[in-house]
Image: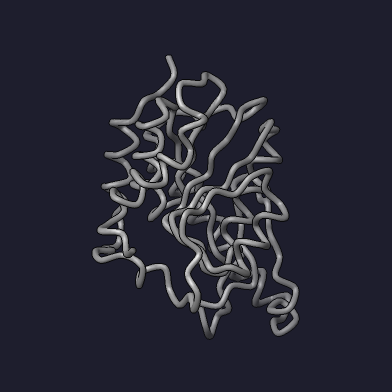
């Protein structure tokens, strides 16, 4: 059942969210960067505004692919206590500061001067291209809640079962059409999975539906 690419995944995911089409209280947020092309398909199908949500994984210095947490806009941090226990406060502070600076830079770059969408009282659908550890998704849900969203939905084309359960405990709803046994990496469930560039994110946002 592998997805051809992120566009294909977004189109299939959008059909799972059809009940939210045509509503004026729905916003779609793509997690940067891989979630943005998926989210663009969802937003187009639903007729909803699209924005980015920049959340940065906090990686262990000697093993960056292992996350001790994640940071979102406004300094929100989601913790992974088991991994944090292996790190010194200085190590964590160094990584957190660097990722916070990168987050702020990307927000400025991607929006091209546009303010972020106002999430207050809205149904917010957060979209990524897949869910591996779930740390970034959990941070994203926390960001949307802190921004006073009325309802937070996490939507992904494919996910690891354990991570999906962790996110389901925090989001109001989780939509995921494919939870394969023996999950390895998100990329293995796509036939074509190139890295999404900053320029692609900027172009996708520029073409998306924005509220007047």
For the C terminus, the quadrant is top left
Q: Where's residue 23, x and y in %?
A: 51, 21
Q: Nearer the viewer, residue 80 or 42?
A: 42
For the N terminus, the quadrant is bottom left
Q: Where's residue 136, x and y in %?
A: 57, 59
- Whether residue 97 is situated above or below residue 171 in the rendered picture: below
Q: Specify how the rendered protein is coloured.
A: one colour
* Residue drawn where x is 39% and y is 53% of the image: 33
Q: Where's residue 43, x and y in %?
A: 40, 34
Q: Where's residue 30, x and y in %?
A: 45, 45
Quarter where residue 96 is shown: bottom right
- Whether residue 209 is situated above or below residue 73 in the rendered picture: above
Count of marks, rendered view? 0
* Residue drawn where x is 41% and y is 40% of the image: 14
Q: Residue furthest top?
A: 212
- Whether residue 181 is situated above or below residue 79 in the rendered picture: below
Quarter where residue 78 is shown: bottom right
Along the horizontal axis of the image, is 34 left or right of 100? left
* Residue drawn where x is 36% and y is 47% of the image: 12
């Amino acid at each position: 059942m592998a997805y051809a690419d992120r566009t294909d995944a977004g189109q299939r995911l959008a059909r799972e969210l059809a009940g939210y089409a045509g509503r004026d209280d729905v916003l779609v947020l793509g997690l940067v960067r891989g979630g943005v092309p998926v989210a663009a398909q969802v937003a187009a199908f639903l007729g909803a505004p699209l924005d980015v949500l920049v959340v940065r994984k906090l990686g262990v210095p000697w093993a960056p692919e292992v996350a001790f947490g994640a940071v979102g806009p406004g300094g929100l941090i989601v913790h992974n206590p088991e991994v944090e226990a292996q790190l010194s406060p200085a190590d964590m502070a160094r990584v957190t500061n660097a990722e916070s600076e990168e987050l702020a830079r990307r927000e400025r770059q991607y929006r091209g001067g546009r303010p972020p969408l106002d999430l207050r009282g809205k149904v917010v659908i957060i979209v990524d291209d897949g869910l591996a550890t779930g740390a970034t998704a959990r941070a994203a849900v926390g960001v949307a809640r802190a921004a006073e969203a009325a309802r937070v939905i996490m939507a992904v084309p494919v996910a690891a079962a354990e991570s999906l359960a962790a996110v389901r405990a925090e989001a109001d709803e989780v939509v995921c059409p494919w939870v394969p046994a023996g999950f390895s990496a998100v990329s293995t469930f796509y036939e074509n999975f190139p890295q999404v560039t900053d320029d692609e994110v900027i172009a996708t946002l520029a073409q998306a539906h924005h509220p007047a």
